[in-house]
Image (tube, grey):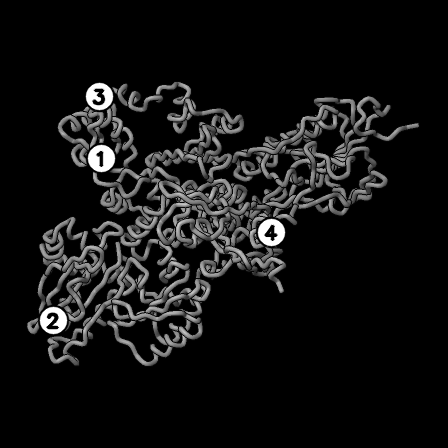
Amino acid sequence: MIGDWLDIGPVDQIAPGNARTLPVRGADEIAVFRTLQNEFYALVNKCPHKHGPLSQGIVHGNVVTCPLHSWNISLKTGEALGEDQGCVPTIPLRVDAGRIYLLREAVVGRAA
Amino acid sequence: MNAPASFGDPVKRAPVREKLVVIGNGMAGCRAVEEILARDCNRFDVTIFGAEPRVNYNRIMLSPVLAGEKAFEDIIINGDDWYADNGITLVSGDPVVSIDRDTRTVVAKSGRIEPYDRLLLATGSDPFIIPVPGKDLAGVVTFRDLDDVDKMLAAAEKGGSAVVIGGGLLGLEAAHGLSLRGMDVSVVHLMPTLMERQLDEAAGFLLKAELERRGQTIVTGGDTAEIVGKDDRVAAVRLKDGRELAADIVVMAVGIRPATALAKAAGLTVERGIVVDDHMVTSDPAILAVGECVQHAGNCYGLVAPLWDMCRALADGVTESPSGFTGSVTSTKLKVSGIDLFSAGDFSGGAGAEDIVMRDAARGIYKRVVVRENKLIGAVLYGDTADGSWYFDLLKKGEDVSSIREALIFGQAFAAGGALADPNGAVAALSDDAEICGCNGVSKGRVVETIKAGACSLDAVRSTCKASASCGSCTGLVENLLALTLGDEVQSGPSTLCKCTSFSHDDVRRLILEKSLKAIPQVLQELHWKTPDGCASCRPALNYYLLCAWPGEYQDDQKSRFVNERMHANIQKDGTYSVVPRMWGGLTSPRELRAIADVVEKYNAPMVKVTGGQRLDIFGIRKEDLPAVWADLNAAGMVSGHAYGKSLRTVKTCVGSEWCRFGTQDSTGLGVKLERMTWGSWMPHKFKIAVSGCPRNCAEATIKDFGVVCVDSGYELHVGGNGGIKVRATDLLCKVASEAEAMDVCAAFIQLYREQAHYLERTAPWIERVGLEHVKAGLFDDPEEVSRLVTRFRFSQQFMQDDPWAERAAGKDAGLHQHLAEVRPLEFAQ
């Protein structure tokens, strides 16, 4: 089971309300978020609008506000909220024993 | 022939009782035995091994024992007679040291060998010890069994200080007990929020405030570096930030790990815990496992409710009526007397999830329930947990709550009554003398009169009869009364700060001061925010308002700042940053220019540009290179130019009397002095200054927030200019004779703007809104006012003028710049 999941390190690398980045060679960078409610999410680090780095936005609830033009993106679904239309791919993530795992095929598969 | 016990063949029973050996005399082991006996009391001949030299007791009640609220006798689940009555052999104080699966025997520490037909592992968990120097000193204890409690009680008898490492459920209960026993207690918690796995930020904040009120020292975000010893005993705990907390005893309560050593040594499948199927059977069909030591469907459990579910599934399985364990939803209650706290389920929100928040600041209550697709999926309650079990029940059953949704947050009594189906109806039913606003003592009758007399908006009601003008908890009731009285004619008042609150910017700023609110979660609670943690509009505004209200005291909240202020650089459309070093008054030197040139080459910056504010802007720097760039610029004596902030940007100057044949005063010198005085100050919005040496105004001072135009007789001071989307020329504020006066008026004007404007309001719209006369009156009506404003500004500045670049270059907040890791798929590895 562990083999299907990519260990990207302990949860305390990301402070609540923050995000950090995970570049993937040959594919889009991934942003890993930790909300103030201590939920973890991973999305492609690219706003569906003009490709702003979502990892740099303000996190509230489980929404991130893009730093470039303030689109609100759901961390759970990757969908733009409100009037805006668009969606960014999400990467299945799980937390186990204090470590963060991403679904390997969703990370690496996209690289192919 | 005496056949061995058979599996999967219920018809063929062994003629004698099967031998069931249980390793672990704790809650799970004994409960499993109880459940089996209840189903078939003749099936097994039971032997229980326990490491502790005592009968089975309720481990989760150790906290009340430590707190002195219960005695050990009170928490015994099964006494000696239970073992005797059921023919169970208890081997206590003699732990099992190995399992031989081939001969189906276990060996105890004393050498005793016990054969089994079926073996049940209920080894529980071990406390996790953080690997810091000093962890083995005398006086460092865990909080797991009665021996630990005895050690803590012995220490408490001598008094002194206790440090609890870990601010989770167990740590806080230990801290509470030691505090009641008279010790001076500090809790060190690695995360910013106490009990972060169970609580959200708002509830964690309330809990911290209450524990501090009770005299405990709570250090959140505290990372233990070392336990310091003296004569082989613990003396203090040193944190990584250098702080030292005196300690006569240290309680390590950072977490637990499934105790799997025996199972692993016996060759069973073990991941994080001992892997079991739905019937609690391990990879060896003769061996079962239950409790905190197991891993089921990827999950390990540390709470008691899932244990009971597992024991039921196990007993059903071994008595041939398999039901299966399907995992548990867990709920948490903190056993600290006087603190009511409950959490259950998923309260992370999410797509389609809707938060219902209720806050009652006066009673210290925070409630939040999360609903998705008409089902309750999570709840956090603080201060009033009476409805915890009701919510938990709704959650586990997955009942449709749409019919009671409106009243859900008010609890079972309201929801069951159905009285609140129409919220206006409930208010209509109130008598005229019913109190609506407790803070200002306003009755329903008076609110209705006020509305009938012409107050057609929430704000008008607030300013006329004061209802809901203080804490705002009755805002909903006043809105109901407006709707009842006026129908569709209710006017929406001046815009609220954002959709999370019914208060305007001015109200929030006033209440922050009146109520001494000093942290964002405190503002959200006291002012009854409708969302659990605000939004991208209110968080930055509140961060600024608190920073302005409590200089030197308020802890700036990075995660509430826009990207540019968090990264101390300007984000560009490709996600890279631009960097603008400060050049005082627009002056520079060969050394600075060389350093900038070197940075441009070293980091391959694709562009350097002269800005409108007379600075050099280096483009295309990656976030991970920013600290190194800043270190290089710092080395040449340059600091942050704050070109990214809602703050003083630049002071633009012309060359003035020093060089220019028309110059009347030293405009460059004054510009440098103004910039030295004002740099680093956070403001409602960006703020630009310029100083021109004569009325030809080469520095374009009349489209700046604060502009100085030098004339022969002194200095004309202009305010409220803007060269942006809507060009606005400045208003003349006043004329002064000396540089010193010009600087004082500048500082006073900035401070007035800082204290009064709304967040994200430039000086131009602010002056348009309040009027120039208001600004003049605020500065000059009272001859002492300028100097009071100057004093407040300078006081605030002493905390602002640390170069943020230098801190980052020295390694602060490195996580904001570095990647977590990098993924290189194999095809790219070459």
Q: Nearer the viewer, mark 3 or mark 4?
A: 4
Amino acid at pointer 2: Arg
Residue mark closest to the camera, 2 vs 3: 2
Q: Residues within 10 Å of mark 4 (few under 14, many from 20)?
A: some
On screen, residue B376 above or below B348: above
Disc 3 to disc 1: CB gap under 8 Å: no
Q: Amino acid at mark 3?
A: Asp
* Residue type, label 4: Leu
Residue at the spot x=45%, y=25% of the render?
B401
- What amino acid is labelled 1 in the image? Ser
The residue lying toward the viewer, choosing from B718 and B281, is B718
Judge from the rendering whether residue B572 lies leftward or rightward of residue B647; answer left or right. right
CA–CA distance between discs 3 and 4? 64 Å
Query: Which chain contains the residue that carries disc 1?
Result: B
Horizontally, is B78 left or right of B230 in the view?
A: right
Vertical placement of residue A2 versus B473, above or below: below
Tell me, for residue B89, which label it has, or none: none
Mark 3 or mark 1, earlier in chain? 3
- Residue B562 point in image, percent of width and height: 36, 54
Q: Which residue bears the numbered disc 1?
A: B492
Q: Name the element at disc 4.
A: strand
